[in-house]
Structures are given as C-alpha cells and as structure tokens.
C-alpha cells in the first residue's frame, strides 16, 4: 500500500491478522483476571487432571501466573531442582512469543534456582544469587509443567515448589478494553477502533513489527475517516477476510499429510505474523519446537471432516510407534471445535500418553479407537 492510498484488500487482511494476535492475548488476560482469587504475581496451581481450560495438558502438574513488573520492582521466580522427569518453566510475552524456557535442556547452566524477572531497561535491586531475566515489557505469562509419569504425588509436590514473589509494590496497568468475541465469531471492523491503546500496551519484538504497525494504523485511519469507509472494511472482513483466515488455519501455515498438520516451528515466529496469530487462536501459549512438536487433525486421510457422531481408528505401525521419536513423552488428546476443550464422555477419558496402559496388537502396532462406538 503506497502512502496516501486507500488500503487494498491485502493491506486490510495483513493488518487484521497482525492485530488479532494481540487481541487474543488481551482476551485471555481478561478471562484469567476474571477468575476468583486472581492477582498478578500470584501462582495458580491447577489441580491434577483439570480439563477446565483450552487445550489442557493432562500429562503434567500444571501451574500458571501473570507476571507484572515496573521500573522499580522485580519478581522472583523459584524453580525447584527436578530430575528424571520432564519439566519446564515457560515464559511468554503479550503477543504469544516465548521469552525463555527454564530447564536442563534450554538453560543447562542454570536449570533451577531463583530468577529475577525485570522490565527491560529497568535498574531494580537484584537479590544476590538470583539470575536476571528481562521480559519484553511490563507483563508476561508464566506456564510451568512437571511430568506426572507414574508418580503424580511427587509431581504435585514439585509443582508446589515453583513460587513467584514480587519485591515491592508493582503498578499494574489493566489490559486494554476490547469487545467480547468468540473463536467462531471473531472481531470485525471494531478491531481497528482502539489501535493506539492496543499497540501501546505491549512491545512486539518480532522483526518488522514497526512496519506492520504502520499498516495497522493506516487501516485504522481509513476506517475512522468516514462511515462509508467503515462499512467497506466491515463487509470485506465479514464476507471474505475473516472466513478466509478461519478456513486456512490448518492449510496455509503448516504441511498437510494424511489429514494431519503440524511439525512446524512454533513459539517464536519471526515476521510470520499469520502463523503467530493462528497459534494464538488454535492453541494459545504454544511453546517452542525445541520443547514440543504439535500435530493436529480435523479430517480423515481422504479429507473428510471428523464428526462426533462417527468412530475412528488411529493406527501406529509397530516400526513407527510414538515413543520411538520422543525424548520426553508423547500424548494424544481429543478436543472439540471451535472451543478447543476436551470432549465430554461417560468414561471421563480425555487422553492417552507414554504412561497409559495400552494393549499392543499381535504385530506390535498400536490402535486407538475414537468415537461413540467401539471400532
């Protein structure tokens, strides 16, 4: 789009997709903050087996916390020493970009201990022995996981040894006010109404972010210039751009093989804003590919959409079992669309993983049945 020109369809689509990533994180912050007992810098220790959130990880003892710092404060994160089981303390910024994973793989020189989380450019007093980690701004999301293995009580004990402590009073800005929206009914032209507040609320460290934000502001200015402009953009979003985005989530950002998508770089996206927004929508707080590899399917191998009234068979040949290609653990979970929550069933069975008591076929293969009737 040239300076002074009316934004074309591609410019509007690019601006929308870029901005939607931030909107999705703002929405999640609002959802989290509305829960009883919520406070910034206060850990929420999720109960074992809890499936009451999007894309739940049922293989770990899970905890989460919204971190908030300012120029005069520091937040101390304590990570316990953990051996012989998977764990990580994952910290993400307000766009869904991973800042760091603390564990023996990513930070072998400092895999546990006390970490001082700070606002970039600030000069607070750091306690002796604490390792400083600069966030990307004033807020971040902490997600920590400890593998259950076959000893969930030990995992629960270790979960409680992760702690967060704020040193000093922190001035916390509320998240920007945005309209309510659902995954099945995304924002329309109203996404461009609060552009200044939204963009100024969180630094984007992605390459090219400044150029992308110029494009967003240009579209916002065009929308605000007249009711005709607003109606034009609203129609484009409603009839073409948003449906096209939703329809391409599992086709344009990742390879499609036998009905499965995945195996792409996640967690840090460079200038691929489409991929970042897709992951924020389909599985917010995605970790880096060095920590986890995601695969998902919404269709059979022939392209027929999966349907809850049908039953399916997931087959792993004996020479291609999941455990042959993982260093930690593997897990399969069934969630519904578009809410991405576990599918209710009489058995209250939501996933299988490396530690499940699964019966192998005589030929050494693994078959997992999915659906309302045995297969």
Image: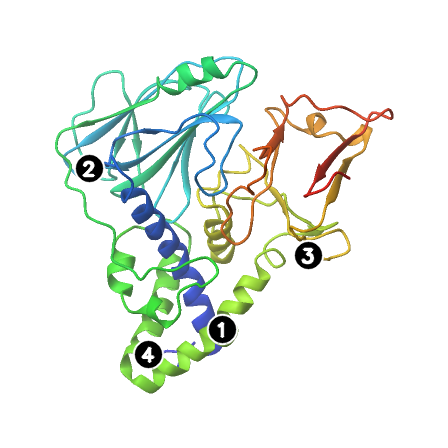
Residue appearing at x 66%, y 53% in the figure: 307
Label 3, label 2: how far apart the Cα atoms are: 51 Å
Q: Give the quarter of the figure containing the N terminus.
A: bottom left
Helix, strand, or loop for circle 3?
loop
- Identify the mark nearer the N-term, 3 or 2: 2
Residue 292 falls left or right of residue 168: right
Image x and y of residue 246, in percent: 54, 62
The residue tagged 4 is 222
- Say above or below: 6 vs 196: below
Binning the other alpha carbons within 10 Å of mark 3 as few (below 14), some (14 to 19) or many (20 upward) gives: few
Check if mark 3's residue and mark 2's residue have beta carbons within 8 Å.
no
Residue 45 falls left or right of residue 125: right
- Identify the mark nearer the N-term, 3 or 1: 1
Check if mark 3's residue and mark 4's residue have beta carbons within 8 Å.
no
Mark 2 or mark 4, whichever is nearer to me: 4
The tag on residue 305 is: 3
Binning the other alpha carbons within 10 Å of mark 4 as few (below 14), some (14 to 19) or many (20 upward) gives: some
Q: How is the image coloured?
A: rainbow
Mark 3 or mark 1, whichever is nearer to me: 3
The residue tagged 1 is 10
Helix, strand, or loop for circle 4?
helix
Check if mark 2's residue and mark 4's residue have beta carbons within 8 Å.
no
- Identify the mark nearer the N-term, 3 or 4: 4
Label 2, label 1: how far apart the Cα atoms are: 39 Å
Mark 2 or mark 1, whichever is nearer to me: 1
Label 3, label 1: how far apart the Cα atoms are: 29 Å
Residue 160 falls left or right of residue 311: left
């Amino acid at each position: 789009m040239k300076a002074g020109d009316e934004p074309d369809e591609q410019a509007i689509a690019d601006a929308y997709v870029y901005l939607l990533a931030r909107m999705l994180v703002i929405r999640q912050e609002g959802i989290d903050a509305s829960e009883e007992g919520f406070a910034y810098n206060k850990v929420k220790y999720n109960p074992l087996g809890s499936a009451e959130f999007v894309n739940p990880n049922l293989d770990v003892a899970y905890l989460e916390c919204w971190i908030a710092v300012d120029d005069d404060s520091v937040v101390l994160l304590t990570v316990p020493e953990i051996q012989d089981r998977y764990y990580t303390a994952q910290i993400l910024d307000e766009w869904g970009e991973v800042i760091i994973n603390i564990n023996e793989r990513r930070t072998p020189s400092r895999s546990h201990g006390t970490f001082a989380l700070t606002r970039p450019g600030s000069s607070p007093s750091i306690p002796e022995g604490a390792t400083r980690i600069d966030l990307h701004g004033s807020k971040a999301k902490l997600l920590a996981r400890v593998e259950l293995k076959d000893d969930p009580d030990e995992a629960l004990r270790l979960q409680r040894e992760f702690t967060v402590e704020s040193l000093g009073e922190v001035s916390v800005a509320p998240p920007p006010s945005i309209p309510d929206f659902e995954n099945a009914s995304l924002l329309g032209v109203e996404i461009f109404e609060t552009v200044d507040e939204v963009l100024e609320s969180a630094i984007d460290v992605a390459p090219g972010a400044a150029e992308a934000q110029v494009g967003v502001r240009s579209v916002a200015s065009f929308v605000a210039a007249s009711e005709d402009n607003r109606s034009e953009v609203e129609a484009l979003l409603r009839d073409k751009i948003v449906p096209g985005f939703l329809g391409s989530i599992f086709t344009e950002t990742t390879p499609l093989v036998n009905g499965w998508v995945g195996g792409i770089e996640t967690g840090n996206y460079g200038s691929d804003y489409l991929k970042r927004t897709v992951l924020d929508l389909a599985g917010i707080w995605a970790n880096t590919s060095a920590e986890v590899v995601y695969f998902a399917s919404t269709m059979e191998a022939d392209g027929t959409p999966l349907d809850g009234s049908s039953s399916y068979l997931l087959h792993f040949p004996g020479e291609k079992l999941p455990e042959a290609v993982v260093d930690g653990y593997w897990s399969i979970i069934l969630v519904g669309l578009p809410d991405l929550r576990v599918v209710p069933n009489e058995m209250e069975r939501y996933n299988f993983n490396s530690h499940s008591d699964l019966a192998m076929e005589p030929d050494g293969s693994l078959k997992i049945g999915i659906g309302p009737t045995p297969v």
